[in-house]
Image (cartoon, grey):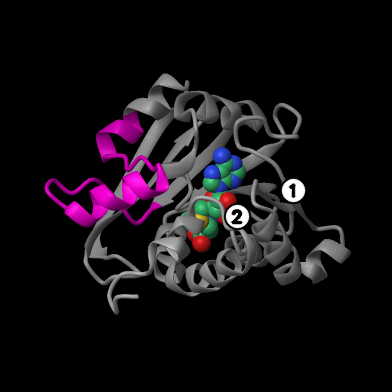
């Protein structure tokens, strides 16, 4: 394995963590995504009564963070068994207290009723959503009226970045620009779109990366 880039067989687990390597990558993501998450969440207004869902919750660090920010219930959803297992372990106490639930499922067809959540977040996951426009509409369905969607990514497209291109092919991922995210959200029916960006570093390679967090209202 090169010092700078993780081996492909480990990296491929970012799309859907599986087995021991998936578990190992989740541990790394829990640590490496922390700076992005703290920066992004500083732009999010959470009230003590909010009911929150984190889609593509991975290791469950953001579920844990939200449990400390609201007195409402916090849910995590992920289609990877390993992610569900690790998120559940991290948030065991809140699950036992019935304040938290980690659900296995796909963003494309979520097992939640219409108008359920005040906030639906997703960190470093929308790159992998299979049908982005319809998946955003599915998020809109489960949000309450005036509820918020919140997306945080540490990558935006960089022209001529060969490693980014390779990773998109390896992971079958889509990296969206600010304009594309705006357009998808608008076309999915969201309004009041607000966006923040920051020139920073990729958390794994320390290459230049452009962070983005974007929020919009149902
Ligand atoms: C790169 S990891 C990010 C995990 C975590 N949010 C973080 O910031 O560390 C992407 C996560 O999204 C999940 N995911 C990807 N596509 C998904 C889909 N269509 N439905 C549900 N979860 C999905 C993956 O299983 C994985 O746990």
Q: Dot 1: what SS?
A: strand
Residue depicted at x 41% and y 31%: 192
Q: Dot 2: what SS?
A: loop
Q: Which residues are magenta?
A: 153-182
Question: Outermost residue toward the left?
Answer: 160
Disc 1 marks which residue? 103
- In this image, 170 relative to 143: left or right? left
Looking at the rendering, which quadrant does residue 26 occupy? bottom right
Queried on whether the Cβ of the residue with tag 1 lies below 8 angstroms from ligand 1, the answer reads no
Estimate the x, y position of residue 94 in percent, counting from the top left: 79, 66
Residue 162 lies in the magenta stretch: yes
* Closer to the camera in the image, 21 or 203: 21
Image: 9 above or below 173? below
Disc 2 marks which residue? 57
Residue depicted at x 47% and y 21%: 189
Residue depicted at x 45% and y 53%: 124
* Closer to the camera in the image, 59 or 50: 59
Instruction: Please say whether residue 120 is visible from this viewpoint.
Output: no
Instruction: Please say whether residue 33 is visible from this viewpoint.
Output: yes
Q: Residues within 10 Å of mark 1 (few under 14, many from 20)?
A: many
Queried on whether the Cβ of the residue with tag 2 lies below 8 angstroms from ligand 1, the answer reads yes
- In this image, 162 relative to 189: left or right? left
Disc 1 from disc 2: Cα separation? 10 Å
Estimate the x, y position of residue 108 in percent, counting from the top left: 60, 31
Residue depicted at x 40% and y 70%: 35
Using the image, tell me which numbered label, if any, was put on residue 196.
Answer: none
Residue 172 lies in the magenta stretch: yes
């Amino acid at each position: 394995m090169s010092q700078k880039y993780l081996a492909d067989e480990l990296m491929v687990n970012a799309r859907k963590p599986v087995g021991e390597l998936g578990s190992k990558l989740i541990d790394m993501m829990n640590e490496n995504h922390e700076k992005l998450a703290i920066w992004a969440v500083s732009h999010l207004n959470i009230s003590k009564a909010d009911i929150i869902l984190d889609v593509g919750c991975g290791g469950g660090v953001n579920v844990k963070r939200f449990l400390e920010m609201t007195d409402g219930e916090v849910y995590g959803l992920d289609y990877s068994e390993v992610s569900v297992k690790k998120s559940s372990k991290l948030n065991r106490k809140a699950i036992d207290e019935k304040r938290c639930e980690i659900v296995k499922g796909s963003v494309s067809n979520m097992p939640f009723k219409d108008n359920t959540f005040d906030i639906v977040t997703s960190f470093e996951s929308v790159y992998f959503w299979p049908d982005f426009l319809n998946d955003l509409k599915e998020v809109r369905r489960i949000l309450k009226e005036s509820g918020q969607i919140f997306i945080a990514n540490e990558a935006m497209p960089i022209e001529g970045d060969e490693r980014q291109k390779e990773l998109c092919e390896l992971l079958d991922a889509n990296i969206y620009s600010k304009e594309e995210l705006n357009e998808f959200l608008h076309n999915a029916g969201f309004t009041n779109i607000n966006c923040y960006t920051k020139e920073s570093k990729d958390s794994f390679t320390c290459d230049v990366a452009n962070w983005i967090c974007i929020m919009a209202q149902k």
